[in-house]
Image (cartoon, helix red, strand yellow):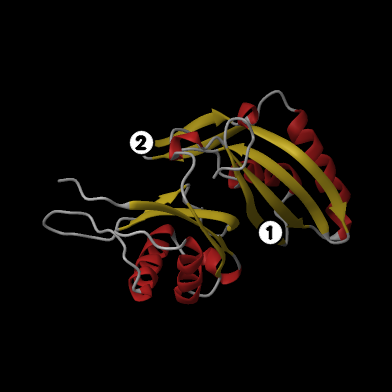
Amino acid sequence: MQEVTFPVRLFYSRTGRARYISHLDTMRAMTRAFRRSGLPFWYTQGFNPHLYLTFLLPLALGVESLCEMVDFRFTKEIGLGEAERILAECLPPGFSDVRAARPVLGAGDIAFSEYDIFLGYPESVREAAARALESLFDRPAIEVVKKTKKGERPIDIKPHMTLIGRQTTGDGLSLRLRLAAGSDFSVSPKLPLEALYADAGEPERVRIIRARVLDSQLRDFE
């Protein structure tokens, strides 16, 4: 007889110092927090049972996020509001804005991520950096080296990215980028920034925040 389980998707933010936690350490921290919660989680079967957790679209080190997601299952039905409250109390610092929901879409439906990026350039080079950014997106191609499990390979990321907006602020440049994302192909926000730095030089400060995860119709992933 097949065991009945109840799927849940947890949405949360990961900001501040939590951006320096690697994906592997994030998995460990979340596993410890979930076990402390005492909630009825489902564990995998077999010789070495472990807590079933699936992290959707793992975050690059040094990047913050307002839309992190992890899937799990309960062995019995429990109110989502109660689950939110209990898990929020157990998560480590930097993990906040917890929301639990029933999964609507599958991981394969993820198509894009949008990032808010701030680049702190001193006033003496700020306008030159803004021109370099504009010039970058005017190019017919943006060639970068992408690291994969099979090694490094050159790739043109221009077809896989959209500059949604940009502005020069009092202390640097702010921009929003939409990048291809998903299990089959994903573009890190660090790749177009590396191409920009080649022309504009590296900024004094960088902050990258993943603001949205979208499906192919540009709808928020749920």
Q: Give the Cα distance between marks 2 and 1.
A: 29 Å
Q: Quadrant of residue 32?
A: bottom left
User: Which residue bears the numbered disc 2?
Assistant: 150
**Residue 152 in the image: x percent, y percent?**
44, 37
Residue at far top of view: 140
- Of callouts 2 and 1, the N-terminal one: 2
Above or below for 98 versus 8: below
Q: Residue at x 37, y 68 (%)?
A: 34
Residue at far left of view: 47
**Residue 155 in the image: x percent, y percent?**
54, 29
Quadrant of the image for the C terminus?
top right
- Name the residue type under label 2: Lys
| In this rendering, position of residue 96 left or right of residue 142 | left
Depth check, front residue: 145 or 180: 180
Q: Residue at x 63, y 26 (%)?
A: 159
Q: Residue at x 28, y 60 (%)?
A: 51
Q: Are marks 2 and 1 in contact (CB under 8 Å)?
A: no
- Name the residue type under label 1: Val
Find numbered disc 1 in the image and state the secondary structure of the residue it sits on: strand
User: Which residue bears the numbered disc 1?
Assistant: 206
**Residue 108 in the image: x percent, y percent?**
45, 35
Q: Which mark is residue 99?
A: none
Q: Residue at x 24, y 60 (%)?
A: 50
Depth check, front residue: 115 or 104: 104
